[in-house]
Amino acid sequence: MDYQSIINEIAEEVFPLLGDGKVANYIPALAGVNPKQFAMTLTLFDGTQYSVGKADTLFSIQSISKVFTFTLALKFYGTDLYKRIGLEPSGNPFNSLVQLEYEKGKPRNPFINAGAINVTDALINHYGNDETAYEEVLEFIRAISDDKTIDSSDVVAISEMEHGFRNLALANLMKSFNNLDNKVEDVVGTYFKHCAIEMNTKMLSRAMLYLSNDGVDPVTGQIYITASQSKRINAVMLTCGHYDASGDFAFNVGLPGKSGVGGGIVAVVPEVMGICVWSPGLNANGNSLAGTKALELFTTKTGLSIF
Ligand code: GLN
């Protein structure tokens, strides 16, 4: 398949949509990003990459980090993790408090904010302190991306904490139900540092390869997780990766995927490739508007959906 021509065509087709969405504006560091940007990268199992647009531009990965923290928590805790976090789609916005109160502090899944904050708490338990939990997640991301330069933006992380009232509320609510072990500020602070990691579409599509290949990096042969764990992460990405628009994403794109409010979306084509698309303008559900359309066009043009 001529992947380069296909993604060039997609970039042209989504061009009129750039600027239609709304850039995340809950912190100044994200509000200042130019919405009229677009990039897309495909990474195959031999490491070959096809890119279009601003594929070297770093952006805030935000909730895409939830895939990586969930991977590590599942690796260390196995099915015990499900005692503290559910696996069902929430049908609610990513930062909703309402369901968490009804369900006694047990987050619906690891990809909404409450779930990812809870996963971070489990990782702090595992690693012994918040600083190590942050460093080890960063090291894991560097390893799966095969790029040691990746880092977190202090400006974004600090700004998130200054405006993090809702996430702190989610953590406090879980703490009140005895479903959070460490100090609220430490857990939320670590969660924000993971969200503030900056990557480009080349790095993120490379980072998806272990999930396209049953937990094993096809380029290096490194085994990260079991095939069964990889299958389950993909399943949760498909059902919960886009919050209350997960059904819509499964319907229109048909791939396991995870979005972030920085405008990035990662997707997995099992046995074939990792994908990342980026465009900062978001739809009403907080998912990249042009990015979602680009992925829909991709599976339509290539037939590479899981269905
Ligand atoms: N840092 C963001 C938050 O916690 C991440 C949300 C997202 O990317 N959907 O609100």
Image (cartoon, rainbow, N blue to C red):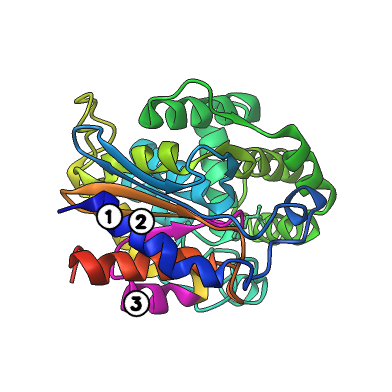
| SS for dot 2 | helix
At x 51% / y 37%, what residue is drawn? 56
How far apart are the two marked residues, 2 and 3, measured between alpha carbons?
20 Å
Residue occupied by mark 1: 5
Residue 112, placed above or below residue 186: below
Mark 2 or mark 3: name the one nearer the start of the chain: 2
Magenta region, residue range:
245-264
Quadrant for ligand 1 reads: bottom right
How far apart are the two marked residues, 2 and 1, measured between alpha carbons?
5 Å
Q: Are marks 2 and 3 in contact (CB under 8 Å)?
A: no
Q: Residues within 10 Å of mark 2 (few under 14, many from 20)?
A: some
Q: Residues within 10 Å of mark 1 (few under 14, many from 20)?
A: few
Measured as percent of width and height from the top left, residue 275 is found at 34, 50
The amino acid pointed to by label 3 is: Asn
| Residue 188 position by quadrant | top right
Q: Nearer the viewer, residue 293 or 80?
A: 293
Measured as percent of width and height from the top left, residue 30 is found at 73, 52
Mark 3 or mark 1: name the one nearer the start of the chain: 1
Which of discs 2 and 3 lies nearer the camera? The answer is 2
Measured as percent of width and height from the top left, residue 261 is found at 61, 58
The amino acid pointed to by label 1 is: Ser
Question: As drawn, is 271 to the left or to the right of 261?
Answer: left
**Residue 305 seen from this side:** no
Residue occupied by mark 2: 8
Work out which residue is located at the far right of the displayed protein and give it. Answer: 162
> Is residue 260 a member of the stretch shown in magenta?
yes
**Residue 165 seen from this side:** yes
Q: Are marks 2 and 1 in contact (CB under 8 Å)?
A: yes
